Amino acid sequence: MAYFDIFCYCLKKKKVFLIPVVVALLCFVLAWVMPPIYTTEIRLQIDASSSETGSFGAVSSMLKSSAGGLSNGSIASLLGSQNTIKPSDLYLEILSGREVALSTIHKFRLDTLYKKKADELSLKRFNKDVMIGEDASGIISCAFEAKNKVMARDIVRYMVDISNERYLKLQKERLQYSIQYLKSQERELMDSVRSISDELVRFYRDNNLVNLEAQTELTVKALAGYEAQINNYKLSEQVQGKNNADANEMRKKRLLLERKFRELRGKYDSNYVPTEKSLYLNSDWASEKTLYQEQRAADLKRFTTLLEFVSTEKMNTESQSLKNQPVIQIVQDAYLPDWKTRPKRAVWAIAGFIGSFVLTLFFVVYHGISTGAIANCGEARQKLEQIKASMRK
């Protein structure tokens, strides 16, 4: 098929191509007489100073990270996975939710305007007219299209007002839940602090201890003194000789010191408990007890730090729950649009012209091929005949 022949044939039928021009004019006039659709928009942002839901997530995170190293697992057992959501995401979920949409439809009787009896059908139509989103800077927008510009403005204002009310209620509920959560953690931490403190008191009382570190240091000094005296007695015995009376006396003293040394330094019985009449301890026993005491003291300090943190956050959250600040900040209020959004006359005219031009060109070429008016199109005509024959069968 020669495209040049097709082009020449189309030039012969140039009057037919006035049809797209007429169609474009008709589309332009149709867009002119159609009722205009107006769009209004309200823009807002969540007030960060009043949208925080307490330190629930921060407390959970801190407790989780700290409770893992504690020997008392009661705190860790209370901590579940607490997922937080951004205030803007939560507000968008409410604004675009089914409840707000149905409330708006019933408030403005949009179901009668849409001529839909079922709520689901009205919702589908409503969702086509409403546009809700958030830009990169965190500004939330809510726009609505309607033939009545006043109703469009009132609809977006109503949607924001009811969403603000529901969001504020939800935030208060979350704050109350956070307060209850913090109170429960505070009670649990206080019980843990009290339990460890009582455990350390019992440990000192049952083992006749006054100050484990100081007594251990005193014992080490005593051992050092015993060792020095034992070495002196050994040297004196060697100088005096075995049969000397003074040497025998020194030997008795040395043996006595060695027994005292072994009591403070050597192995101890499983039932060993320091005597109440002495501040000296068995050094090996004291080393094991020191490790235990240090561990429990570290746990006590960690629990105490957590308790201070939770108590502070609880007071901050309670203070925040008493505030009555606006939940949202209106960046741009809804307005009465002075220019329609659609239909666009130029767009309708161009679309009508392009569509009709393509159809006209198709029918002109088809007519030329089927009648043989276009030269060098025998093969194409045969294919058209085959198609026609197949359609007749």
Image (cartoon, grey):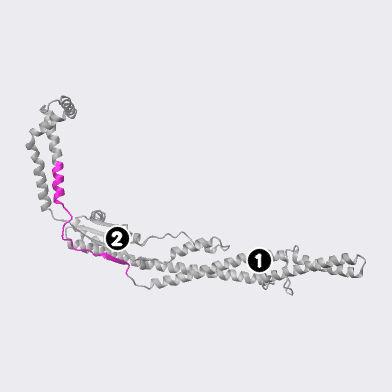
Q: Position of residue 235 (x, y in %)?
A: 84, 65
Q: Give SS at disc 1.
A: helix
How far, Cα to Cα, is label 2 from label 1? 60 Å
Q: Is residue 53 left or right of residue 338?
A: right
Compared with 388, 117 (above or below) is below
Rendered image: mark on residue 140: 2
The span shown in magenta is: 326-355
Residue depicted at x 26% and y 60%: 142
Q: Quadrant of the C terminus?
A: top left
Q: Residue furthest right?
A: 243
Residue depicted at x 27% and y 60%: 141
Q: Is residue 299 visible?
A: yes
Amino acid identity at mark 1 = Thr
Rendered image: mark on residue 290: 1
Q: Position of residue 114 (x, y in %)?
A: 20, 56
Place residue 252 in its image quadrant.
bottom right
Place residue 337 in its image quadrant.
bottom left
Q: Is residue 219 left or right of residue 382?
A: right
Q: Give SS at disc 2.
A: strand
Q: Is residue 353 magenta?
A: yes
Circle 2 residues within 10 Å: few <14, some 14–19, many ≥20: many
Amino acid identity at mark 2 = Ile
Asked whether the beta carbons under mark 2 and mark 1 sit within 8 Å of each other, the answer is no
Residue depicted at x 29% and y 60%: 140
Q: Position of residue 244 (x, y in %)?
A: 92, 68
**Along the line of sight, the residue nearer the viewer: 162 or 301:** 301
Q: Position of residue 360 (x, y in %)?
A: 12, 37
Q: Residue furthest front?
A: 239
